[in-house]
């Protein structure tokens, strides 16, 4: 059976490694620690997370347009203290260069337009700064809700995406729940103003901080 390539455009699917790999359970962020002073003793708690995922179709090597690929991703707190978590999702497409098939060039792939993350939990919020923020404090050994459960490439992708390499990377950051810690670490100590998508996120997290 023959298919019209313009209707059935396939892209090799690669879930690769940047700061961490989406595929299995991998250590993501262990650089940041939380410090809390009590009774004149200095107690140090570890802030550490890993990607926890299930039900990825690991044998898949290519993906058609407008077809959802099951991919369930959430983050687990494997540290010793409660923490706030944010995640940057970085889709990447490398297409061939006309006249030089051995070289690759990056092609645009815009979330919500050319790629869709399906069934994101209401406990995740888009900060408008490239990150999705989890609107809950995550206890040690606990997991977030799913960041998304599947991904889909839009049907309007141009033919130049045919036979391109498609990857998705995650950058995960965690911070302790001490007052002002997330503002200092993530927003250079600034408090978001009116009209900023981060304002609602800030108000939600501020209610959850531990003094």
Image (spheres, helix red, strand yellow):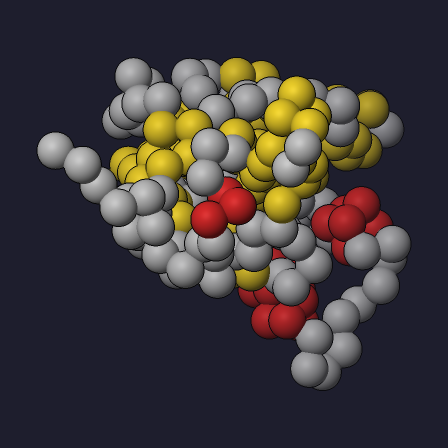
Residue 66: tell me if it is visible: yes
Q: Please name the residue shown 70% across and 75% down the image.
A: 196
The residue closer to the viewer here, 208 or 131, is 131
Taking the view exactly as shown, the residue that stands out farthest to the left is 1
Does residue 196 sit above or below 76 in this rendering? below
Q: Is residue 86 visible?
A: no
- Residue 203 point in image, percent of width and height: 62, 68
Report how many numbered discs are placed on residues in the image.
Answer: 0
**Residue 83 lies in what quarter of the image?**
top right
Relative horizontal placement of residue 177, taking residue 125 as reference (left or right):
right
Q: Residue at x 70, y 59 (%)?
A: 129
Q: Is residue 181 placed above or below 112 in the rendered structure?
A: above
Q: In screen coordinates, is 67 left or right of 211?
A: left
Residue at x 59%, y 36% (from the top left corner): 95
Outermost residue to the front: 99
> Residue most toward the bottom?
194
Kindly identify the residue that appears in the image at 28 percent across and 36 percent down.
70
Q: Is residue 28 left or right of residue 51?
A: right
Residue 150 spot, x, y in % from top left: 33, 42
Question: Which x, y percent locates residue 193?
Answer: 76, 77
Quadrant where the N terminus sits is top left
Residue nearest the observer in this picture, 206 or 196: 196
For residue 83, above or below residue 152: above
User: Which one is nearer the viewer's eye here, 175 or 105?
Assistant: 105
Residue 173 drawn at (x, y percent): 66, 37
Residue 40 or 103: which is nearer the viewer? 103
């Amino acid at each position: 059976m023959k298919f019209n390539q313009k209707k059935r455009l396939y892209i090799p699917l690669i879930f690769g490694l940047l700061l961490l790999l989406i595929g299995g359970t991998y250590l993501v962020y262990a650089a940041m620690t939380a410090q809390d002073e009590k009774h004149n003793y200095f107690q140090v708690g570890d802030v550490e997370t890993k990607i926890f995922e299930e039900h990825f179709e690991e044998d898949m090597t290519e993906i058609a347009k407008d077809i959802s690929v099951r991919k369930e991703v959430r983050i687990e707190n494997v540290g010793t203290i409660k923490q706030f978590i944010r995640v940057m999702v970085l889709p990447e497409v490398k297409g061939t260069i006309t006249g030089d098939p051995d070289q690759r060039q990056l092609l645009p792939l815009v979330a919500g337009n050319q790629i869709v993350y399906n069934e994101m939990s209401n406990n995740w919020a888009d900060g408008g700064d490239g990150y999705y923020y989890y609107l809950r404090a995550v206890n040690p050994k606990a997991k977030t809700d799913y960041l998304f459960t599947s991904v889909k490439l839009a049907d309007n992708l141009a033919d130049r995406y045919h036979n391109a390499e498609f990857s998705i990377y995650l950058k995960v950051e965690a911070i302790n729940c001490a007052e002002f810690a997330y503002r200092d670490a993530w927003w250079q100590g600034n408090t978001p103003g009116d009209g900023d998508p981060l304002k609602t996120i800030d108000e939600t997290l501020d209610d959850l901080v531990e003094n």
